[in-house]
């Protein structure tokens, strides 16, 4: 069995420091840099603990996770500033912010019977994840099978916002239906859908899910890290 990437580094380091004792103060380390001033800070032992997002230029230091966070092990490229999406070691959801990192919510994979996964699950397994890219206020998760999950475009369809007319459509049984304002599901950026499997979901009727990319957008002149980095021996003596 082969163990790749971050998991191998963590295992070797843990074996090396197993005989070490802890210092009294919980260690803190930067595990990811978005650019020259924005970063993620982990406070905890053995690369697990509380996670904070820091942007000193905007005066932001916010708690993303209060405990148990572990770093995402695959490629992670994130030039986006307003919309921030943070995966974890085994992401069945993402921590997302739509206000430059001031506040955080969970984004999840859409419930969909038209799965594209070999395991027939609604989301990819950790072993199948290849990369996660967040650019132009959209998140793009690519699997090793070439399946692409993404969040919506960064706006809500005005037709399903309060005061809108809703969206009329005909369902699979030929019945007329209407997506009423406030019933269209999570707002923009809070749901991830495999673009190959969007057919049949009401999301495909919404303007923020139409004309979507079919591949991960190219990122140019990126100044951040391409992977999270964590030292499990931090704070040990």
Image (spheres, rainbow, N blue to C red):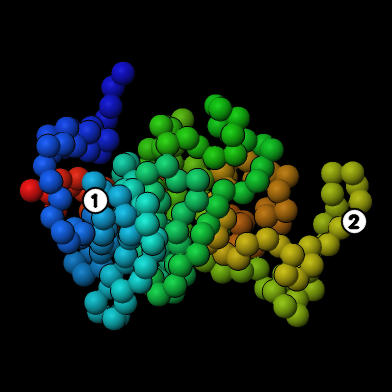
Q: Residue at x 71, y 48 (%)?
A: 201
Q: Helix or strand or loop: what does disc 2 sit on?
A: strand
Left or right of 104 on screen, residue 20 = left
Which residue in the structure is indicated by mark 1?
Answer: 45
Residue 5 visible in the displayed image: no
Q: Residue furthest top?
A: 1
Which image quadrant is residue 60 in? Answer: bottom left
Q: Residue at x 17, y 61 (%)?
A: 25
Q: Earlier in the sequence, mark 2 or mark 1?
A: 1
Residue 193 visible in the displayed image: yes
Q: Residue at x 39, y 49 (%)?
A: 88
Disc 2 to disc 1, how far (Cα)? 56 Å
Q: Helix or strand or loop: what does disc 1 sit on?
A: strand
How crowded pointer 2 is (Cα within 10 Å; few <14, some 14-19, many 20+) is rated as few
Q: Is residue 208 above or below residue 18?
A: below
Q: Contact (CB < 8 A) between labels 2 and 1?
A: no
Question: Closer to the camera, 125 or 82?
Answer: 125
Which image quadrant is residue 14 in? Answer: top left
Q: Is residue 70 above or below residue 160?
A: above
Screen quadrant of the N terminus: top left
Q: Nearer the viewer, mark 2 or mark 1?
A: 1
Where is residue 124 shown, x and y percent of the image? 50, 37
How crowded pointer 1 is (Cα within 10 Å; few <14, some 14-19, many 20+) is rated as some
Where is residue 31 shown, x and y percent of the image? 23, 55
Q: Is residue 114 above or below residue 213?
A: above
Question: Closer to the camera, 57 or 92?
Answer: 92
Q: Residue at x 59, y 39 (%)?
A: 122
Left or right of 24 on screen, residue 120 = right
Where is residue 166 shown, x and y percent of the image? 78, 69
Left or right of 121 on screen, residue 30 = left
**Badge number at residue 176:** 2
Left or right of 88 on screen, residue 106 = right
């Amino acid at each position: 069995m082969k163990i790749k990437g971050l998991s191998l580094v963590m295992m070797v380091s843990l074996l090396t420091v197993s005989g070490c004792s802890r210092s009294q103060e919980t260690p803190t380390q930067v595990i990811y840099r978005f650019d020259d001033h924005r970063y993620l800070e982990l406070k905890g032992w053995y690369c697990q603990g509380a996670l904070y997002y820091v942007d000193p230029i905007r005066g932001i230091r916010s708690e993303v996770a209060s405990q148990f966070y572990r770093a995402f092990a695959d490629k992670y490229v994130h030039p986006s500033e307003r919309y921030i999406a943070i995966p974890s070691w085994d992401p069945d959801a993402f921590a997302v912010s739509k206000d430059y990192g001031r506040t955080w919510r969970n984004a999840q994979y859409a419930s969909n019977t038209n799965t594209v996964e070999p395991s027939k699950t609604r989301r990819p397994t950790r072993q199948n994840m290849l990369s996660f890219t967040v650019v132009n206020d959209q998140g793009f998760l690519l699997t090793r099978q070439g399946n692409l999950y993404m969040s919506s475009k960064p706006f809500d369809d005005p037709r399903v916002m309060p005061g809108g007319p809703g969206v009329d459509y005909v369902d699979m049984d030929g019945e007329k239906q209407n997506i009423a304002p406030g019933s269209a599901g999570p707002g923009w950026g809070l749901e991830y859908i495999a673009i190959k499997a969007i057919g049949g979901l009401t999301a495909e009727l919404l303007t923020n899910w139409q004309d979507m990319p079919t591949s991960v957008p190219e990122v140019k002149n990126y100044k951040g890290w391409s992977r999270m980095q964590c030292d499990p021996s931090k704070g040990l003596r």
